[in-house]
Amino acid sequence: MKPDAIFDCNPSLAGMASITENLSFTCEGVTHPLTLITPNRDEQASACFPLVVFLQGSGWTSPNRYYQLPQLCRYAQRGLAIASITHRNAQEGHPFPAYLKDAKAAIRFLRSRADEFHLDPDRVAFFGTSSGGNTALLVGLSGDDPRYRTPDYAGHSDSVQAVVDCFGPTDMLDYEGNKLTHLLDAEGGLNLQALAQHSAGDEGGFLDTLLGLFGDNSPLEVLRAMSPVYAVKAGGTYPPFMLLQGDADDIVPLSQTLKMHEKLQSSGAQSTYVLVSGGVHEGNFWSQELHDTIFNFLNKSLRG
């Protein structure tokens, strides 16, 4: 019988990908789940895949590692391995820098298993949204910084070769349009009156996160340490950055991305700024064209 169509087979498994669940990494005694998507390959192939570590925004609480997974699968089908990670919840007694330490431990864990999953440990990027974007920027600016290093997966680096930040907060001390700085008194401590007013308003849920991020530490010091814009040093050696935000974002002011882009450029770092016209915080921000732009940046940065 004559077939209606005939196709050649795909011996290299090009365009195919697999998801590996039941993976986890540990940081300071806390275990976190991790989802890994890797391109399929011919078992005879020797090439390893560049890796992109992805962190979904959560307001520094509990990231949903599945939120962008359908879109991220396309990155893997085009040759990049993707690891979607989580971190400790600031509202559950884990102040800054717990979330940053967790992100860095995830990078070291993946490098420690690079041979098993056919990952290239020398080509790693970090991609995050919202609070995950804040984390991505801090990761890119603090490679192997001993302040954020834990004993987990010792002997492996947590530096990265590229960073993608989508609408992440960059300056927690000067957060335009938000009451954040009103919580501090002249000495940088908590203003109890402003705190009570803040707690009674619509932003009370975020207040719990802020208090969790502060812990027993100085609020002023924490806010500064959480702000990537203050971590940029003139003449520093940094990976290339791509910063993306919508001009209709009513959660993170657009000025946060603009000042970060300007600070990176003035320091001599490579920074690409992408504006999404009419884009809000998540939702209509995303398009296939935007994902293609991010993929092309990552692919070029990691593959050269």
Image: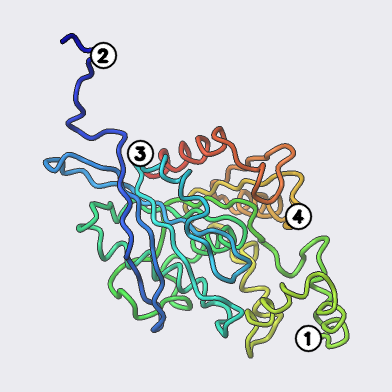
Q: Residue at x 32, y 65 (%)?
A: 22
Q: Position of residue 81 (x, y in %)?
A: 34, 48
How busy is the neighbourhood of tag 4: few (under 14 within 10 Å), some, or many (20 plus)?
many
Residue type, label 1? Leu
Tell me the SS state at disc 2.
Answer: loop
Judge by depth and name the residue closer to the eye, 93 or 244.
Answer: 93
Earlier in the chain: of badge 2 and badge 1, it is 2
Earlier in the chain: of badge 3 and badge 1, it is 3
Which mark, by number, is residue 77? 3
| C-alpha separation, residue under disc 2 versus residue under disc 3 | 24 Å
Q: Residue at x 72, y 37 (%)?
A: 277
State which mark lies toward you, 2 or 1: 2
Residue type, label 3? Gln
Q: Residue at x 78, y 86 (%)?
A: 190
Tell me the SS state at disc 1.
Answer: loop
Residue type, label 2? Ala
Residue type, label 4? Pro
Q: Position of residue 61 (x, y in %)?
A: 59, 71
How busy is the neighbourhood of tag 1: few (under 14 within 10 Å), some, or many (20 plus)?
some
Which residue does the numbered mark 4 point to in the structure image?
253
Which residue does the numbered mark 2 point to in the structure image?
5
| C-alpha separation, residue under disc 4 versus residue under disc 2 | 53 Å
Q: Position of residue 279 (x, y in %)?
A: 70, 42
Q: Circles 2 and 1: CB distance less than 8 Å? A: no
- From the viewer's perspective, tell me whether residue 248 is left or right of residue 97: right
Which mark, by number, is residue 7? none
Q: Residue lying at the far left in this picture: please name it.
A: 44
